[in-house]
Image (spheres, grey):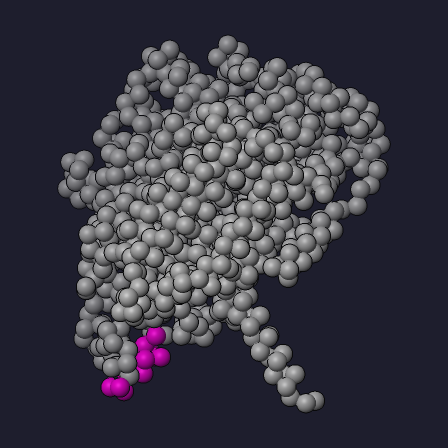
Amino acid sequence: MGAYELSLLTLIGINVLLALSLNLITGFCGQISLGHAAFYGVGAYTAAMLTKAGIGFAPALVAGAAGAALLGLIVGIASLRVRADFLAITTMGVGFLFLGVVRQQEWLGGELGISQISESGLGETGFLLLVLGLAAGVFAISLYIKRSWMGFAFDSIADDEDTARTVGIDVARYKLVAFALGTAIAGVAGGLYAHYARIIVPDAFGFTVSISILAMVVVGGIGSTVGVLIAAVLLTLMPELFRFINDYKLLLYGGLLLLTMRFSPAGLAGLARLGWTAGRKAERRPA
Amino acid sequence: MRFGGLLLGSLVAAATTLAGAAYAADTIKIGFNAPLTGFAAADGKSALTGAELAVEQANASGGVNGKQIELVVYDDGAKPDQAVPVAKKMIGQDKVAVGVSGSYSGSTRAAAQVFQDSGVPYISAYAVHPDITRAGPFVFRTSFVGEVQGRAGAKLVGEMLGKKRVVLITLQNDFGKSLAAGFKEKAGDYGIEVVNEYQYSIKDRQFGPIVSKVAADKPEAIYATGYFFTAAPLVKQLRAKGVDAPVIGQEGYDSDKFLEIAGKAAEGVIITTSLDRDSDQPETKQFISAFEKKAGFGADMVAASGHTAIKVAVAAMRKLDGDVSDPAKLRDAIAATEDLTASTGSISFNPLGEVMKAVQVQVVRDGAWHRHSVIDDTALLAPPAK
Amino acid sequence: MLYLDLTLQGLIQGSMYALIAVGLTLVYGLLRILHVAHAGLFTLGAYIAVTVTNAAGSLLLAALVAVPLVGLAGMAIYRLLYEPILHRPPFVALIASIGLFICMEEGFRLVFGPYGNSFDLSPVEGSVQLGALSLQTVEAATIVAAFGLLGALAVFAGRTRIGVAWRATVTDPEMAQSFGIDTVKVRYLNFFIGSALAAVAGVLVALLNNFVEPTMGSVPSYKMLAIIVLGGLGNVKGTLVASLALGVMESFGTIYAGHIMDRDAIAFLFLVAVLMVRPQGLFGKA
């Protein structure tokens, strides 16, 4: 495999991690977030600062996850106060606040960001394997959670919070768990990204990034682990696939979001389900 | 999962075949990344047009030892995370002999690291961040580091114009911040008192509050960093408010678009840049007219910079008689560039790969850019050497 | 004096925000959709204004073309995009809207070029003197337009038959329908008026900056969301007050807190702080 394929696969792995992490919060637990890139950013900045200070790559990744989860918990606590669209806007606000503050911190490189971040020490293939391994792990955990009691609790909160409360589910606790878990994974993705690009600037964690992560979740089919995985892969590859038509690739991206939502609002997962039932019906009916 | 893995594999394969253009031995490829979409698309397009012009001119004059040059262009949206795969693609798939950045600092820095790690030369056309060339010996820059141009601005304001009470209006990005840092570093040397500094974001077009405050500050001069799309509305709003202190800008203003947007308010604005509209140099004169013919609009600093960077790459390849099989030799040939005449001046590099050339000072007179003066103070303009 | 000037500048910015945000809050009030593509309509208004003025030489004509045309475009977006997905969860419409907004921005870039456009001849010059304060004619026009149009809207909603029907539908669509109000017609009207107001803002911004560009809607696209939340989603008066308050906050913030955080962060700090104390927004009903 060439350097380009390696780097593309690594980027896909990082985006899969990001999309699955948001899927835990938005897909499973029903808490819309428009500021997910902030947690990604906290992980990236924490890990980058630590490895630049001479601390090992692994502890730096863990610290990045912890930092992101800490902020995630704070936002999670805030999310207990606001609901639905208000929550969406609040998380968007958190994203802008994160960016606005980081931009002005000279010790974080300010606008110039942090460059010459040390290498992970794993080599390109080793790094890719780590990223893919982590993505596979989170994928497996997602599948497991979905089937567990926690998954059921998440589901019922996403469905109707008040009903969940009346059947004795500790709504607050589960929401916080979803936020902590999802943001910690985003933090890991951030640490990986920092050592992939080896330069980070505030804009890499801006609003458009939050939106593109959410787009992966929604296009995949909110809550569907497999759908989100496929969408993350597809949406990462799309700009690469269409590089030969530089001028139109963003237009295509926007068009894809628009058309998926317009014609298959349940995302790819919905489309697959539709195809599945249609196929079964066709089988049953003699020709 | 099985389905996902399969899909992933086949998509990567598809991406590879689609993009893997046939490698032809009779052409030499130069990689070029620029923001063709997003907020920086205007600069990306100018830089690309300048680069294309340079390639056409080189091919018309025999290419490199008979081989034609092919420009391999990728959009990076001015984003570092897009620049990494783009750089890897140029090196790994397109097998470019040399890469040229027509992009902003963030993406250029990310790509520079990749080129350095792969041992392929990379030339940045107009990005200002000092760390770009620090990626290593394979990375060069044919434009000024932000701080250097900021220092030239301080000399222009404090010494040449004799203005001492100055307000800074700083664009909050790497461009604005590094220019302002250079200006403040040398301000004291020229007796400049920085009365106040205000910051704005690259998305701002309405400057009402800053303009009101500057009017109250009553400075002798305003050093405002920005690009034509922020600076033109700013200057227009300053003048409308009755603030008539001279406005000093930089290469980011350097576009006919600035004149078009600011209109009468543009008169008297002075900038530091690297393209001299009133140059007697045949190379520069010819570039200005050829560019206008090709693009349909006037040449700007970004276009000239894209043109210059390609010219440096071509000159080095010609020195090797078109044998670009060894990237290290090509790197040495680029490093050895000496007094190469280009549209943005005479190009030589210091040991870090930074360009050493004079700063052009331009002023708006009668609705056009004209020569104001030239700053050729080698001690002041010395780029970082490590 | 300076404080007065800064306040005035904040009010100008706030008036601009209000013109754009009112359309958005109306859409939200009626359909519970976060209509991000609204900012694309603002840009469309600005582009039409510049293009028609340069072609026909008349700003008035340009405004008369831009405002209704953008209103119609808003109606088309409702019919073609939102109506079929109304019964879906709200994020479906949100992502669709973001997709449309990206397409619009890219469309402007492909049609009009990445460099942005300006008026060939600046159609409005000069300034107005308000005591010791001076402001540009366009700035004065912005304040007048915001207050005038929103005032007229209030009269329309309060005094006319269709206006009353409209308000009734926003408050309780099912109840309104049971009273025989044609709620579909109300929705079209809603999109027309909201989009037309955004076009007015687009024309004014084009004049103020003498510059329109493909990405000029990106700031309003998200900042308006903050404003309508502050104003209490669906609340027109609240949105006006929130717009003006935010404009003034930003005006002072840019000068006195600009070195700590940027203008966007100031706006969203205000937003998050308010939501933590009043989760229903400044003027929302609990």
For the view shown, which residue lies furthest in the bottom direction?
A: A286
Please give left or right for residue B379 compared with residue C72 in the image.
Answer: right
Please give left or right for residue C152 compared with residue C60 in the image.
Answer: left
Count of labels shown?
0
Q: Is residue B320 visible?
A: yes
* Picture quadrant where residue B58 is located: top right
Q: Which residues are magenta?
A: C178-187
Please give left or right for residue C241 compared with residue C59 in the image.
Answer: left
Q: Is residue C113 visible?
A: no
Question: Eyeballing the image, is C225 above or below C264?
Answer: below
Question: Eyeballing the image, is B314 above or below C275?
Answer: above
Q: Nearer the viewer, residue B121 or A157?
A: A157
Q: Position of residue B102 (x, y in %)?
A: 59, 35
Quadrant (top left/top right/bottom left/bottom right) for the N terminus of chain B? bottom right
Please give left or right for residue C188 compared with residue B61 in the image.
Answer: left
Residue drawn at (64%, 56%), measured in percent from left and top?
B5
Residue drawn at (82%, 24%), measured in percent from left and top?
B321
Quadrant (top left/top right/bottom left/bottom right) for the C terminus of chain B? top right
Q: Nearer the viewer, residue A186 or B365?
A: A186
Q: Position of residue A236 (x, y in %)?
A: 57, 51
Within the magenta stretch, is there residue B380? no
Residue drawn at (54%, 28%), measured in percent from left and top?
A118
Residue drawn at (42%, 36%), measured in percent from left and top?
A63
Q: Position of residue C251 (x, y in %)?
A: 25, 41
Q: Position of residue C19 (x, y in %)?
A: 30, 58
